[in-house]
Amino acid sequence: MAGILAWGVAAVALAVIGAVLLVNGYRRRRFPVIIPGVLCLMGATVCAGVVVTKAVQRALHNAQDALAPRPGAEIYAALFGKPEACVQVIDAQDQIIPKLDSAIRLRVNTCPAEVRRVLQQYTYELKVEAADQDTTDRFSPHTFGDSVFTYSTTIVEGRNWRTLMIARDSTRMVVVDAAD
């Protein structure tokens, strides 16, 4: 910020000096005074260009930080609050732009106490289903055994749904949080 401010002050100062020299040289019909005025105005233009360049670079850097995906532990904490010590997020896919990104997806190693804590946050509908055996999907519960507990709930009607696929021993979980 100090760099942008310094270049901005320099641009304004050079522009004022250049304008004063240009006007005085024109009024007095003195060509040797006009040349430094024009040079000062050119310097002000260069300084203003540096200000614009630095401001654009800063805006791009801030945009990149805002659009960078969050780490898995941060996503988990945003969805469920501060986790128990047993929680380890193995894989995460963040939903950066709703409607374009389908959902937040997490693959988590957990413990029964954490599963109970998570299930107490909302009213879930329980189904016991055969585990999806798709080995190409990294969020498939194919390693959970032959069946999984699937808990589903609607967080906000028509806007946000959450599905938890939990291994029968409550030590592994896949989270799918879809927001429209």
Image (cartoon, rainbow, N blue to C red):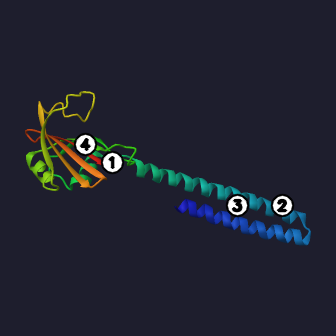
Q: Residue at x 72, y 58 (%)?
A: 43
SS under mark 4: strand
The residue singled out by tag 4 in the image is 106
The residue type indicated by label 2 comes to: Ile
- Of labels 1 and 3, the one closer to you: 1
Q: CA distance from mark 4 to mark 2?
A: 66 Å
Q: Are marks 4 and 2 in contact (CB under 8 Å)?
A: no
The residue type indicated by label 3 comes to: Ala
Q: Residues within 10 Å of mark 1 (few under 14, many from 20)?
A: some
Nearer the N terminus, badge 4 or badge 1? 1
Query: Where residue 70 is drawn, which disc sits there?
Result: 1
The residue type indicated by label 4 comes to: Leu
Nearer the N terminus, badge 1 or badge 2? 2
Please state if 31 lies on the left or on the right of 123 as rendered: right
Please state if 45 lies on the left or on the right of 139 as rendered: right
Q: CA distance from mark 4 to mark 1?
A: 12 Å
SS under mark 1: loop
The residue singled out by tag 3 in the image is 44
Nearer the N terminus, badge 3 or badge 4? 3
Q: CA distance from mark 1 to mark 3?
A: 42 Å
**Residue 113: horizontal and vertical position, in percent?**
8, 50
Q: Residues within 10 Å of mark 4 (few under 14, many from 20)?
A: many
Please state if 152 lies on the left or on the right of 159 as rendered: left
